[in-house]
Amino acid sequence: MTLIDTHAHISYDDYADRIDEVIQAAEDNGVEKIISIGVDLPSSEECLKLAEKYPSVFATCGIHPHEAGKAPERYLYELEEFTHHTKVVAIGEIGLDYHYDFSDRKVQRRVFHEQLEMAKSLEFPAVVHCRESDEDILEGIQNSGNKKGVVHCFASSVDFAQNVLESGFHISFTGMITFVKELEQVVRDIPLERMMVETDSPYLSPKPFRGKQNEPKNVLHVAKKIAELKEISLEEVADSTTETALNLFKKLNAN
């Protein structure tokens, strides 16, 4: 049985002194590949360095909505340079965050739309962050014509999930499904073949690790919860979510 943690921030300083241990623990728990997520230009570069060092690690590059206000003028050119690397698999983490509003909403929308369009032109999947911004996220995806991506750390309604799937995008679940009751129905209603699993490490540790720093090995508990809610085997969840990730993030197959 193999799993893919499709979204982890293992380039953060939280893991600096034990990164070997974190990656080994993931592999020991059947996590075959980890996608390390960039949130700005420097972190995208750090993700790439990790991917170059560890065979199981891959990278994304992108400007997170929190960082949108600080994006340098020529950031798109720099992101495009990253995409030439064999282990950069997606544009992300991009999106909108109307909860914290660390960046002006107008700027967030511009940077989100620019990156969505770049991802489409480069035929790269987009990894999308959505917090209290469902309507504008959906509008952005639909207007861009980009049909290749994922709304990660899904935390919204069944209706929004269905609209995301209709747009062509997939949905990824975190440990939140182990402690947020409202998400259980979303998991039950969404087709297994349109979902992936992730940890969003170091955040959102699943039960029974609430309150502790999350890490990629814990993606197993997300898969177990999906199996429980859908009343199917863990192996079926692992096989399906891994296949979906490999199909979406094509460059995972090249290494």
Image: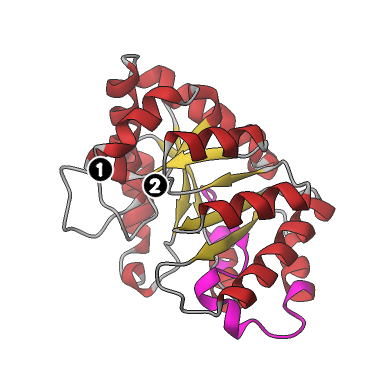
Is residue 87 visible in the rendered image? The answer is no
**Quadrant of the drawing holding the N terminus:** top left
Q: What type is the residue that disc 2 sits on?
A: Ala
Is residue 189 visible in the rendered image? The answer is yes
Numbered mark located on residue 136 in the image: none
Q: Is residue 243 left or right of residue 85?
A: left
Q: Is residue 15 above or below residue 220?
A: below
Q: Residue at x 33, y 61 (%)?
A: 202
- Does 68 lie within the magenta span? yes
Q: What type is the residue that disc 1 sits on?
A: Val
Tell me which corner region of the image, top left, top right, bottom left or bottom right, holds residue 119: bottom right
Task: Say what secondary structure mark 2 lies in.
Answer: loop
Residue under pointer 1: 180
Q: Is residue 180 above or below residue 43?
A: above
Residue under pointer 2: 155
Residue 189 lies, in percent from the top left, at 43, 23
Report if the CB atoms under discs 1 and 2 are less than 8 Å apart: yes
Magenta part of the chain = 49-76
